[in-house]
Image: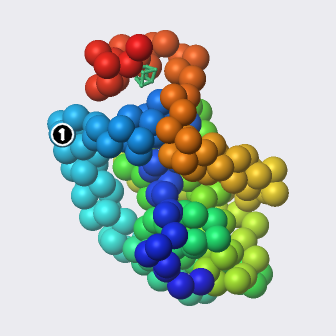
Amino acid sequence: MADNERTPMITPSEVLEHVYCPRFTWFMNVQNIPQHEETRFKVRKGREVHRRRATENRDYLRRKIGAVKREIEVYLASPTLRLRGIVDEVLWLKDGTMAPLDYKYTEARDTVFKTHETQIVMYAMLIREVYQQPVTRGFVAYIRDGSQLLEVPVTEEAIAKVQLLIRQIFDIIATGRLPRRTPYRIRCEDCCYKNICV
Ligand code: SF4
């Protein structure tokens, strides 16, 4: 589906920030207070390393997955989903389905994996919508030390959860309502908004 600049769309990163703490959405998208520059720099730097690694030859991973064709660094946007983002790779699989593949320059840890899982589901939703092809799973390749490939099932339940998050985000943007704080107070300790978050 064509990108429509008049339709507001959010990125997977914004959805993950909302999952981390719903107030991030309020500070960034309602109050327009960006996160600290140094935080952004770290994120940017991380992404550059990540992108560089992503463009290296990873054919063996694609063979393992059963990919017959790929596109790299693909910008996907769907006004219907109100979502847009760049996925490292879009894969066409032997079984006729398609799948996202995302590279992570980290180790696979349970807590981190939950976040990556949500991210993969969002890319899968975008691929389905843009290419109009079935997507039943996605993949995360952890490439810090060697590589570890994890498969993420893309279920209707997981999609419904993401759709709910997107609705919540646009509801905060539309109403300007201050959302609840994260229940994990430890997250407030390093938060760049902690001095203004009451
Ligand atoms: S200080 Fe805590 S509640 Fe407020 S935005 Fe940061 S993480 Fe969320």
Q: In which quarter of the image is the N terminus?
A: bottom right
Amino acid type at circle 1 is: Glu
Residue occupying image coordinates x 51% and y 28%: 178
Residue 179 on image: x %, y %: 55, 28
The residue depicted at 28 percent of the width and 45 percent of the height is: 43
Near-viewer residue (165 or 108):
165
One can see residue 65 in this view: no
From this view, report whether residue 113 is shown above or below residue 158: above
Q: How many labels does the image show?
A: 1
The quarter of the picture where the C terminus appears is top left
Left or right for 58, reference 38: right
Dot 1 crowding, Cα within 10 Å, few <14, some 14–19, many 20+: few
As drawn, the residue found furthest toward the right would be: 156
37 lies above or below 120: above
Q: Position of residue 31 (x, y in %)?
A: 36, 38
Q: Where is residue 20 shown, x and y percent of the image?
A: 51, 32
Ligand 1 quadrant in view: top left
- Snapshot quadrant of residue 40: top left
Residue beneath disc 1: 37
